[in-house]
Image: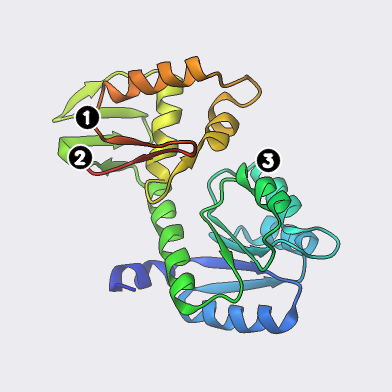
Amino acid sequence: MDKILLEKLKTLSILYVEDEEGIRTKMSDSLRYYAKEVFEASNGKVGLKIYKEKKPDIIFTDILMPQMDGIEFVKEIRKEDSKTPIVMVTAHTDKEYLLGAVELHLEQYIVKPINLKNLKESLSKCVSVISANHAVSKELPCGYRYDFDNKLLSYNEEQIVMSKKEIAFFELLLQNRHRVVTYEELQHCIWQDDVMTDCALKSLLRNVRQKFPKGYIKNLSGVGYRLVDC
């Protein structure tokens, strides 16, 4: 980890939710090496209580737990909080659980046992998301700039007009530029209760792409979209 990332982590708190005490203790001790503070919970119900009281900056959670599992735990958080980075940690590979986690806007899904490389990678992604969410103005490649507070996109100081839905689409990709944003996430975050038709998505994508250099928004067929350096 580079120095800037380590310094940033030292200002952040982490909630680790895991029902196996041995794993929870070991992982929490590892996270304490990097973070300002680490909170522990033995299941989703306890985790939700701690989340509401402490408002951690980053959350790591297991899936299969008693009383409230990880999926339900994250669903409760996402009802009001779409920005806190969440990493799902589990030994479970059942497709039913994986599909249940798709729409929850997770930063990463990692399988036990967690090694140091995966831990550092997850923390790095979470810090990137936090930095983007709290940035008042973000410099983009090729002379572009985006002002999160005022929802303004500019190119060489000249403002580029975007509709409300175009802004939502672009911000979702920008806040998750380290990964592919899935079609399921687009439906959940942008269209919400409305149906995202192929025609509507293509129209939105075409309008947004016209405002950027060719190739800035990349499609991963059958999965979703991500931003790439121009």
Is residue 107 placed above or below 172 in the rendered structure? below
Q: Is residue 9 visible?
A: yes
Q: Which residue is mark 1?
A: 214
Q: Amino acid at mark 1?
A: Lys
User: Observer-nearest residue: 139 or 114?
Assistant: 114
Q: Residues within 10 Å of mark 1 (few under 14, many from 20)?
A: few
Tell me which corner region of the image, top left, top right, bottom left or bottom right, holds residue 189: top right
Give the residue drawn at x 69%, y 52%. Answer: 95
Label total for image: 3
Quarter of the figure with the N terminus? bottom left
Mark whose residue sits in front, 1 or 3 = 1
Q: Residue placed farthest to the right in the image?
A: 67
- Alpha carbon separation for disc pair 1 and 2: 8 Å
Find residue 41 and name its label.
none
Q: Are marks 1 and 2 in contact (CB under 8 Å)?
A: yes
Disc with the residue nearer the chain's start (1 vs 2): 1
- Alpha carbon separation for disc pair 1 and 3: 36 Å
Give the residue drawn at x 31%, y 28%. Answer: 152
Disc with the residue nearer the chain's start (2 vs 3): 3
Tell me which corner region of the image, top left, top right, bottom left or bottom right, holds residue 195: top right
Residue 72: % across, % down: 75, 51
Give the residue drawn at x 68%, y 40%. Answer: 79
Residue 94: % across, % down: 71, 57
Q: Residue placed farthest to the front in the image?
A: 221
Q: Which residue is mark 2?
A: 230
Q: Which residue is mark 3?
A: 79
In the structure shown, which secondary structural element does the residue marked by tag 2 occupy? loop
Q: Amino acid at mark 2?
A: Cys
